[in-house]
Image (cartoon, rainbow, N blue to C red):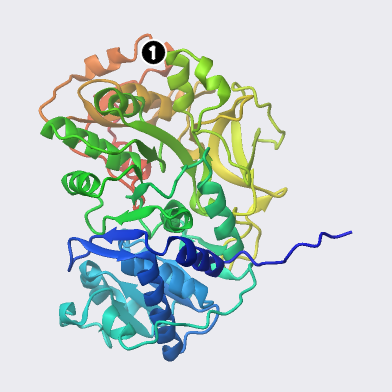
Amino acid sequence: MKGLMMDCPLTVTSLMRHVNAQHGASEVYSLTVENPAHRSTYAEIFKRCAQLANALRRLGLNRGDRVATLAWNDYRHMELYYGVSCMGGVLHTVNPRLFPEQLQYIVNHAEDRYLFADPLLLPLLEKMHEAFPAVERYVLLCGKDALPESSVPGLISYEELIEGEDERYDWPELDENTASSMCYTSGTTGNPKGVLYSHRSTVLHTYASGLSDAINLRSADVVLPVVPMFHANAWGVVYCAPMVGAKLVLPGPRAGDPEALVAMMNSERVDVALGVPTVWLGLLNYLDASGRRLETVRNLVVGGAACPRSMMVDFQARYGISVCHAWGMTEMSPLGSVNAPTAGSAKLDDKALLAQRLTQGRAPYGVEMRLTDDDGNELPRDGKAVGRLQVRGPWVARRYYRAEESALKDGWFDTGDVASIDSNGFMNITDRTKDLIKSGGEWISSIELEDVAMTHPAVSEAAVIATPHEKWTERPLLIVCLKEGASAEADELIAWFEGKVARWWIPDGVRFADELPHTATGKVSKLKLREQFIAGGAAAS
């Protein structure tokens, strides 16, 4: 026997209709190259989405065609998120920080027909447009008056494209499994891989991310996603914030500028902000140096890499701001877990509670997790057993775009992370599989060593990599950046580990760097560190 309920497809279009009806007056503030304080509403944005859809239909966009974006977080990019997907196209967000070879591969592999770009990225387009033979039209995200002279053929402004188009559009009824958007992995090994999201997966992910035990957004909130819209759907914030009616603050090209972020957070009364650790470390250092404060922020969500213990402690102690640890990946849309407390958390002492908060948290309904050993045997959830972290769920990729083979093994997606899970469901990532250090047959966690190094008062950022060793196979090497005006000797940093980790875990050497290399998604690039410090023969100080 089947139930007798309505069969309403879960689509981004239905989300847009809900937001328009319930939260149309909620504000969207964004920075652009042209306008340092552009204000709009969800209702106004969705009218422009209709204009965009009409323009794209005029250009000949068909269902399933890919539309690429090279853009920051602003209202025009948001219009593309909804306008393209809701008319049946596939929004393909492209990371402009990738290497030219990766960009060429991604745009051509996706066979993008149209490409929309931020004005600041025009020099990149001028260098690369000939490498994109399938792209038929280039659109610069600006007004007609701001369109510069360019060598890009047929370049027009976004405002010129949608000018005069009807503010109404007959949005099609789409099957909920229709592709809605696409994002490629960063391709640290081999070519980048395309992750193709569906309307259904996007809506379910939006529901889950808004739960009180997840990002916990409310209609009264003001939300600032520093995490870019060109990567993993800005962690779903451009769907979740409108769903609940929260005001959205989009930082445009200033997302990496701590001074601009502080000014924006205070002027717009931001409650919740989301970003990677490097952004929040820069913000913390700016606050400490400038003496400024964040007047309304109550919660910083950190993901993309492990949150340093010192950062979590310092934000709370100095500024009264809670740092919430989260975890996910492109293949998961990207939400995998969020560190929300349980009833039992209140019974923990300060030390135990901090240890719990430093884990990547618990999976919301919709994500299943398990640990396996190298032979595929499932491991216990006791907080002690460490194994390969595998996931499954309705917003987890089962295959990469245009790949013949499944991305799953026995129905599970292997994340490439090594982790433990305790009896309450708190998951703690020990390391990436490729970053673990095997010394004398035993594993050393680079993440744990980095966390200890970051507690030293002189250290701004730290990374640990494995170096070859004749006797022990591999040994840890610590690489640090010092805070401006601070000093520390290698012996002092080595001694800092005494009593905090097992003696055989303590790094053999220290190297100092002016800055650490980062990937296009803001993570420390250990590949480049290995090339710099191992290929060059540097193993210890």
Q: Quadrant of residue 106?
A: bottom left
Extreme-right residue of the structure: 1
Q: What percent of the width, then of the height, locates residue 386?
A: 59, 27
Q: What percent of the width, then of the height, locates residue 413?
A: 62, 48
Q: Residue at x 62, y 60 (%)?
A: 399
Q: Residues within 10 Å of mark 1 (few under 14, many from 20)?
A: few
Q: Which residue is mark 1?
A: 500
Horizontal side of residue 98 vs 123, given as left or right = right
Most foreground residue, 129 or 201: 201
Horizontal side of residue 132 vs 482, given as left or right = right
Q: Residue at x 41, y 89 (%)?
A: 59
Horizontal side of residue 466 vs 428, given as left or right = left
Most foreground residue, 35 or 524: 35
Instruction: Name the amino acid, label 1.
Output: Lys
Q: Is residue 108 visible?
A: no
Q: Is residue 353 visible?
A: yes
Q: Residue at x 59, y 59 (%)?
A: 201
Q: Is residue 113 above or below residue 536?
A: below
Q: Quadrant of residue 92?
A: bottom left
Figure quadrant of the C terminus: top left
Label 1: element kind: loop
Most foreground residue, 382 or 216: 216
Q: What percent of the width, then of the height, locates residue 89?
A: 50, 76
Q: Quadrant of residue 48?
A: bottom left
Figure quadrant of the N terminus: bottom right
Q: Is residue 383 above or below residue 184?
A: above
- The total number of labels drawn is 1
Q: Residue at x 38, y 85 (%)?
A: 136
